[in-house]
Amino acid sequence: MPRVNVRLHGVFSDFAGGARSTTVDASTVGTAIDALAQRFPSLRERLRDEHGRLREHIGVFARGEEIQHAGGESQAVADGDTVHIVPAMSGGG
Amino acid sequence: MPTYRDYFAELKERIKEATPQQVDAILRSEDVQLGDVREKNEWDEGHIPGAVHVPKSYLEQWAEDRLPNKDKLTVLYCAGGVRSAMAADTLAKLGYTNVLSMAGGFNRWKDSGFRWAKPESLTADQAQRYSRHLLIPEVGEAGQHKLLKSKALLIGAGGLGSPAAFYLAAAGVGTLGIVDSDVVDATNLQRQILHSTERIGEPKADSAKATLEAINPDVTVIPYKERLTSENIDRIIGDYDVVIDGADNFPTRYLLNDASIKWRKPVVHGSIYRFEGQVTVFKPFEGPCYRCLFHQPPPPELAPSCAEAGVLGVLPGVIGTIQANEALKLLLGIGEPLVGRYLLFDALDATFREVRLRRDPECPVCGEHPTITEYIDYEGFCASPGEWLAEHAAKAEQKVAAPAD
C-alpha cells in the first residue's frame, strides 16, 4: 500500500490535535481521507457530510490538482504523494 | 589620418538604409523591431508609434532588453539619419543580422506626413520618484503612465489591505478606493500598518487615506466608510480596474465574487489564518471564480476570524504584498498572474506551495448554465448554505413549472 502524506491546512489541524501533516497508507485520495478520519475522529464530520460526501467548503488537492477535476476521490495516489486538505478561509487580518 | 567624413562614408558602405517611404511600407506589412536612438528630450517631443526608446548613449547596454530578437528585421531612426547609421553598425557588431537605418531620420519622416505621436511625459518629480520603475523595460514610462491612470479597489483596510495599499500607493497607482466600515482599534496595530496609535477610534478608511496620500501625492484615495452590500456594490466596483480582496467575512467574499463576474473585474484574492495564507487571482471567464473553488462557505466553527483565532502579525504582510504584486502585474499587463493558480504560504515552514485551480462548468455563477444571476441574501446563504441552496432550487423549479403569462 502506498505511503501518502496528508497536509492539513488552516483550521483542520486544530481537529487533528495540532498535527499539520501526517502519513497514511492509501491507494486513492478517498481512502487517504478515510484513514485520516480514522486516526483523528474529530475530523470525520468536518470532512464528510451525513451522506459521506466531501463537504463543499473544502478544497482537496492531489498531485497539484483539485480532485474534482482529476477523478474525484477515486484518483489514485502513489508512494510519496501529498494530499492537501484546504479549508476556505475568510480572514483578512 | 582618416577624417570623420571618411569614417562615416566607410560606415555607410557597411550598413543598409531605407527611406521613410520604404520604412512606412515595411511597418505596415512586416513584423519588425523599431528603435528610436535619439535622446530622451527628443523622444519626448514625439516619436513613431510602436517604436521603443533605445538612446544611442545606452545602445550597447539596453539593446538586448528592448530589441530582443537579433534575427528579426530591426529598423532604427534618429533625427537626421547619422546616429541611427552608427547605431546600425553597432547592432551588427552585437550580432543583429538584419538592421536598417532610416535615411533622413524622424525629421524627414514628419516632413513626409507620416504618423507620429507625442508621448505624455512625467514631471521632473515623477521621473525621480518612479526612476526605479522607469529603468525596468517591462514598466518604463509607458507603464508608469498606465499605473498613474489605473484604479484599484481595496476591500478592507486591515491586515491584507494595509501592505497592499502601501505598495500600490508607492508604485503610483493613481486612484485607490478603500472600502472599510470599521474604526481603528488598539488590537489592529500589531499588523495593520496603515494605522497608528493616535488614530485609534478614527474610521479606517480615513486613516488609510491620510497615510497613503502622505506617501505619494500622485495618489487619490477614495474612502468608502460602509460595508459592501448588494445595494452599494454596483455603485462602487464599476469604476475600478482591479479589486484586492482583503475582506474578513464570507458574505462579503461571495458578494464580491458575484459582482466581479457581473462586472468582469479581476479579483486578487487573499486570506489568512494564524500562520497560513492563500493567494490567487480570480479573472472572470478566463479562470475559475471563488465559487468554482468553494461551492459553499464553511460553518462558523470551521471559519474563525483573525479576532477569534489570532494571526501572526507579519503574515498579512507577506500575503498582502503578494496581492499588490499581482495587482500591479494585472494593471501593467505583464508576467504570469496567479490565474488558476492557488498559492499556499506557511509561515512556520517558510514554504510556498502551488496547486492548480480550474473552472467548474457547473459553477452557479460563471458556469455553463448559471443559476445565480442576481445578488442574493449573502448573510442567509453563509449562515446556512445547504438550506439556502435547497430553497433557491425549489424557487427556480417553481418558476420553470409556472412560467409567467
Image: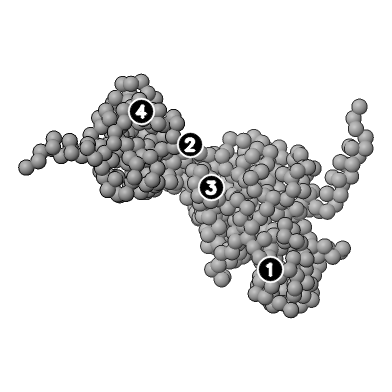
Is disc 3 placed on a helix, strand or loop? helix
CA–CA distance in space, label 2 to label 1? 43 Å
Q: Quadrant of the N terminus of chain B?
A: top left
Name the residue tied to disc 1. Answer: A83
Which kind of residue does numbered mark 2 sit on? Answer: Lys
Q: Residue at x 41, y 34 (%)?
A: B50
Do the residues marked 1 and 4 share a common chain? no
Q: Secondary structure at mark 1?
A: strand
- Taking the image as shown, residue B399 lies to the left or right of residue B9, namely right
Which mark identifies residue B327? Answer: 3
Of marks 2 and 4, the one in the foreground:
4
Towards the viewer: B174 or B226 = B174
Asked which secondary structure carries label 2, the reply is helix
Pointer 2 or 4: first along the chain: 4
Q: Are marks 2 and 1 in contact (CB under 8 Å)?
A: no
User: How much space separates mark 3 and mark 4, taking CA atoms?
Assistant: 42 Å
User: Marks 3 and 2, Cα distance to the nearest angstrom?
Assistant: 14 Å
Percent x, y for residue B291?
72, 50
**Along the line of sight, the residue nearer the viewer: B45 or B11:** B11
- What amino acid does circle 1 point to? Val
**Tag 4: amino acid:** Gln
Front tag of 3 and 1? 1
Q: Nearer the viewer, mark 3 or mark 4?
A: 4
Q: Quadrant of the C terminus of chain B?
A: top right
Residue B158 percent location from the top left of the image: 57, 53
Task: Estimate how packed mark 1 is, as few (under 14), some (14 to 19) or many (20 or more) residues with alpha carbons within 10 Å.
Answer: many
Residue at x 68%, y 38% (from the top left corner): B262
What subunit carries mark 4? B
Judging by the rendered image, the residue that carries numbered circle 4 is B22
- Label 2: which residue? B149
